[in-house]
Structure formats: C-alpha cells, structure tokens
C-alpha cells in the first residue's frame, strides 16, 4: 500500500493540474484531458445519479469504493479501475475509510470510440501500475505530463482492446449483415433499440450503421424502423392500432403512428381500414 500524506497529495494535485486541458494523440485518437486529480475518503462525492458528456476513469490507489453504473453495482478495489463512458448514468454508493482514487475526465476529439458493450471494471496491468507509481514518487519531479498521458493511453488501449477485436471479427461481408438482419426480424416484437442490437453484436452503433448502410443505403435506425413498420402492416388487418403498437414495443400509439406515417405516408388507422 502506498504511503500518502497530505503534503504528497498536495504535490500530486499540483502536478496533475498542470496536465489539465492538454491534448495528445495516440493511434487514431485525439484526447483532451479536462481534469485529473486525487480524491480521498473525506472529500465530498456525488451520491446522486448523474452522467457526463465525457469519459471518466476512476483508478483506486488505496482502499475501495462502490459505484452503480447503469443500475449495476461494482466494488472497485486497490489497483482496479472503472471506465464510465459519456452519457452513462452512475453514482457513488460508498467509500472505505482509507480510500484514495485518481480520476480522469477526458473527451475524444478525433477518432471513433465505442461506448457500448464495455466490461467497465478492470485490473491494472503491471505497466499501468508503474505509470501510476510515478505520480506518487517523491523523487519523480519533472515528467508528470509524460507519465500521466502514458497511463491514460494505456488505460484507453486496454478498455478499447476487446471492442477493437470484436469489430475486426465482424468483417463487413454479406453474411454478417444477414446475421444482423435475422436478429432484427426475430426480435421485432420487442422494445429493442439500436443500442441493444449493437451490444448483442459487441460493436459500436456507428460500426453497426456502416454495415447496414453498405447493404441497404439506410442508417441502422431507419432500417430498424422500416422493418418494424413492415411487420405492423402484416399485423394491422388482425389487430387494433393499440394492440399492434404494444406488440411491436412502442411506448404509445402516438409514437407508433408517427413512425408508421413517416414510412407509409398513411396513418395506421387509415391503412388498417383500407386493408381489412
């Protein structure tokens, strides 16, 4: 366990502050760091559910804390970290008495970063631990920018590694689109979203849309909507508008009618009347 006193913490936070609002590039990513600081157990933390427009990495350097991310609770212990993507709801539940964590807030200004399907909790690698230890070394004076950026690069590389492999496996061939199309057709009578389908195939929404546009000329959202409305046309002669909307997972008749009219140019009621 690292020995950390108040003077070391002040020194570390001064170093970290110098890195804030800097930018660096690795692979195809251009990263902008908003802030980076060490937080202790006696500091106030946000107990309310919230989200950010940027990424956060919480790296535990001592003790542990519990965090709920998308309604799933994680206990993150020493030398473990959790990455929270943008727009993902989360809240801190509790922290241990000896708790310290290092927190990054950053955005990706260039390059596609998948934000779905993450396994958010990870154990730091040996190299990652060495990078973090540099920040806590009293002898280490002049290169906090370098070590900070290197450690962030390693964290991101590790977090994105599984997603990158998954997207390489999904070669953009017709057989892949056939699998996606079959999954959509088999699940039309659910409230599934584009996000849900991306998670099922372990790819980003953008990658899913690229595959879809290649074979249909439509974004995946429009493709999904058209398939649902095609199914609705088959159901309406036998079921009411409300029953059809419920069966296809729409939240209400208004949402269903809006989608139906956008695709067919007619209201569901009129289409049903003409095709009974």
Image: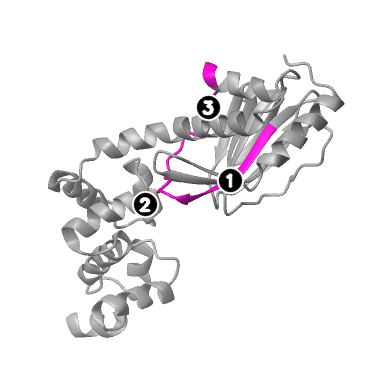
Residue 161, by quadrant, is top left
Residue 134 within the magenta-colored segment of the rendering:
no
Mark 3 and mark 2 in contact (Cβ < 8 Å)?
no
Disc with the residue nearer the chain's start (2 vs 3): 3
- The reply to whether residue 276 is in sight is no
Q: Which residue is mark 3?
A: 122
C-alpha span from label 3 to label 1: 18 Å
Q: Residue at x 14, y 44 (%)?
A: 175
Residue 135: % across, % down: 68, 25
- Quadrant where the N terminus sits is top right
Foreground: disc 3 or disc 1: 1
Q: Residue at x 35, y 47 (%)?
A: 198
C-alpha span from label 2 to label 1: 21 Å
Q: Which residue is mark 2?
A: 205
Residue 182: % across, % down: 20, 49
Q: Residue at x 63, y 30 (%)?
A: 59
Secondary structure of the residue carrying tag 1 is: strand
Magenta stretch in the rendered image: 102-127
Q: Residue at x 75, y 30 (%)?
A: 12
Return the residue found at the far front: 142
Q: Is residue 154 left or right of residue 138?
A: left
Please tell me how crowded label 1 is: few (under 14), some (14-19), or many (20+) other residues with Cα within 10 Å: many
Foreground: disc 2 or disc 1: 1
| Picture disc at residue 106 | 1
Mark 1 and mark 3 in contact (Cβ < 8 Å)?
no
Return the residue found at the far top: 1
Instruction: Tell which of 153 and 221 is nearer to you.
Output: 153
Residue 200: % across, % down: 34, 43
């Amino acid at each position: 366990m690292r020995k950390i006193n108040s003077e070391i913490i002040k020194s570390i936070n001064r170093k970290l502050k110098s890195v804030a609002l800097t930018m660096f590039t690795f692979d195809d990513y251009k990263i902008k760091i908003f802030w980076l600081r060490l937080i202790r157990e006696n500091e106030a933390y946000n107990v309310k559910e919230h989200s950010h427009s940027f990424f956060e990495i919480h790296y535990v350097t001592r003790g542990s804390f519990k965090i709920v991310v998308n309604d799933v609770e994680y206990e993150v212990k020493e030398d473990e970290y959790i990455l929270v993507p943008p727009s993902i709801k989360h809240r801190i539940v509790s922290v241990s008495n000896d708790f310290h964590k290092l927190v990054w807030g950053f955005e990706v200004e260039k390059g596609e970063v998948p934000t779905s399907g993450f396994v958010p909790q990870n154990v730091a690698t040996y190299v990652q631990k060495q990078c973090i230890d540099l920040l806590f070394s009293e002898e280490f004076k002049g290169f906090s920018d370098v070590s900070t950026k290197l450690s962030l690069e390693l964290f991101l590389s590790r977090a994105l590694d599984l997603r990158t492999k998954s997207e390489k496996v999904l070669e953009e061939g017709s057989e892949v689109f056939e699998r996606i199309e079959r999954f959509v057709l088999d699940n039309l009578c659910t409230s599934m979203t584009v996000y849900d389908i991306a998670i099922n195939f372990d790819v980003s929404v953008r990658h899913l849309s690229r595959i879809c546009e290649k074979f249909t000329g439509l974004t995946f959202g429009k493709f999904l909507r058209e398939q649902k409305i095609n199914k609705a046309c088959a159901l309406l002669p036998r079921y009411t508008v409300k029953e059809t909307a419920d069966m296809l997972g729409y939240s209400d008749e208004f949402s269903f009618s809006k989608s139906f009219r956008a695709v067919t140019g007619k209201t569901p009621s009129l289409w049903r009347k003409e095709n009974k």
